[in-house]
Amino acid sequence: MCRTAVLAALIATALSAPAQAIPSFGRKYGTSCTTCHTVYPKLTPFGEAYRRNSFRFPGVDSDYVKQEKIPLVPKVPGDDDTYGISAIPTLALGFNGQTVLHPDKNSSGGRADNGAVFLTRDMVAEAHLWGGGSFSDVITYFGEVTFASGGTIALEHAQVFASDLFGPKHAVNLRVGRGFSTLTSFGPHSSYLADQILPSSGVTALGGATGGTTWNVFDHFNGFEVNGVIAGRADYSIGINAGNNSTLKTQNSENFYGHVGYKIGGMSLDGEGDSKVRDAMRPWEERAFTIDGFAYRSVNSATFADPDPTVVVPVIQLDSATTVGGHVRAQYDSLELNTGIYWETHNHAAADGSGAKLLAPYGELSYVVHPWFVPAVRAEYSVFSPDNGPRVHNLRLMPGIASAVRPNIKLVLTVDLESANGQPAAPDGWHTVGGIASPPPGSTSNLVGLELEYVQIFGAFAF
Amino acid sequence: MKTALVLALAVFASPAFAGEITGKVDVTPAKYLAETIVYVEKAPGTFPPKTHKMDQKGMKFLPHLLTVTTGDTVDYSNSDGVDHNVYSPDNEGFNLGMIAGGKTGKHTFDKPGTYSQLCSVHPEMLAYVFVGQNPFAAVVGKDGTYKLSGVPPGQYTVALWNSHLKAKGVDVTVGAGKTEANFSVKR
């Protein structure tokens, strides 16, 4: 892959699909995006509770539904919750893309774009078709298909939720289908500046695996998940999924993961009970501290080009990975800090079968002056340690401003500053972790000082 | 003679001799009829304060239009499981803060005017509280008719409030029985 394409792809990955911010939920309840979001897809405490509750309002969800419903089964006398579908399609559309500026065309980012300074090529890079709603008060659904301007189509979400299976309300819910693995108490897109709150990993990709066959802690997979909220303060998830199970070497679906979290202060995790909103005019505010821990055990296959360039048959490695990590959110009114770290080890993360490790600390500090003005700064640090090579690291600093120009239209200005000590063996360099820094051609040093790689304006709208 | 005059005044001032103002309101575009109130601009007398109720249920204010008199209090209950905030930016403005499910906030309206009732958490929630100088005000029905009962005999201006349109008042003389005042309001 040429480096120009790499840069475009990594930018698209860094700020792409605003999944789980869908106007069909707004239509369902006749309510504004701001009920759940500040700058979508970033969720307010209430929006997070709604997401944790399998996309259901606290209390009785159907009490808030404004859409007409078509029953699919005969009404049972005394039961107000007839199973059915919405009379209008619960669909929504969204578009997003980015305009890129390279103030320093000699930086790694500038070089990757052949010295171009101003790029509108990807101003509209993706379209998303979402569907979301409820069949009943306890059975809900969510789907997302993403169309890239390059022609690729990705099925990102297709999930059915069966909630309140037994025990206290919200304690035991089942999710079946395709989607993210729940690894923290917060939505996967809980970032103002990036697409994901957890940075991307892709250790086998760093080791040189081809993009379509790499496993990533953040990716969408088919599987089952049981999750819930206990007593409004603790939450958990346990799941099994297929992972990135290549058809070239089919394996059992043995990807297991789980997380536990606990929240102190603020709104309860399920939104039930008395209000904890301090300022009625600023419903995103709370004073709360949430801590999470997660673990992920994955068994995947990854495809590599043979180290011998004369051999065209790819090498397939069966790779096992163990990932453990933690996440903390500390919020004081409009000031919010999200930080965490995870450690990922693989036993076969390169074409020669050697293993590799990745340490990935990250953090994002933001302050909501108003949803149309959210200054923030994000940092991601990746330390890649291949068993058969030198340890290399990449640091990304991303100051920026997120703005909900209108509740369903957003702009995000980010500046990407990077430094690196070498780069992994992958032809794409740091691409898979969102990085672009690389030593200039002919350089005798692996060091890349802090560079301004690009300035980006990301735009999105949904309806 | 003096006693007879006093008796006559007392009789005509009593509710039995109070008049009724009725009429029909024609609004163009018709969709704005739903947010129309007809009221008597000024009426003599003092009116004991009352308490009214406006609920928040299914993320809606109920009723959508509420008429009260200066000095009256409105209890804002929250029948939802989610929190609501009741505030109004109009006139002197007020903000009751967050009202949790099952709880009630209250506000006494000391100045006449129309107050849009909003919830900062749910922007789609909107209702109006019309605060009149007197209690002779009514929400116009779906068929465009209204009725103001118990209006003391006298000369009045009957006015109309609409969330989008303006109309000139109609001068009427109210006696015992019905008095008619019709409105035609266009953009």
Image (spheres, rainbow, N blue to C red):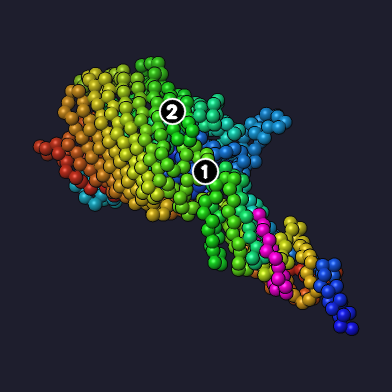
Q: Position of residue A233 (x, y in %)?
A: 45, 35
In this picture, residue B164 sits left or right of residue A404 = right
Tell me if residue B13 can be seen. Answer: yes
Q: Position of residue A227 (x, y in %)?
A: 47, 28
Q: Residue at x 34, y 51 (%)?
A: A375
As helix, strand or loop, the secondary structure at mark 1 comes to loop
Answer yes or no: are tags 2 and 1 on the same subunit. Answer: yes
Q: Is residue B37 magenta?
A: yes
Of the 4 image quadrants, the one containing the N terminus of chain A is: top left
Depth check, front residue: A300 or A327: A327
Identify the residue under disc 1. Answer: A274
Q: Which residues are magenta?
A: B35-53
Where is residue A389, by image quadrant? top left
Q: Earlier in the sequence, mark 2 or mark 1?
A: 2
Identify the residue under disc 2. Answer: A237
Residue furthest bottom in the image? B1
Disc 2 marks a residue whose amino acid type is Ser
Q: Position of residue A444 (x, y in %)?
A: 10, 37
Q: Is residue B178 magenta?
A: no
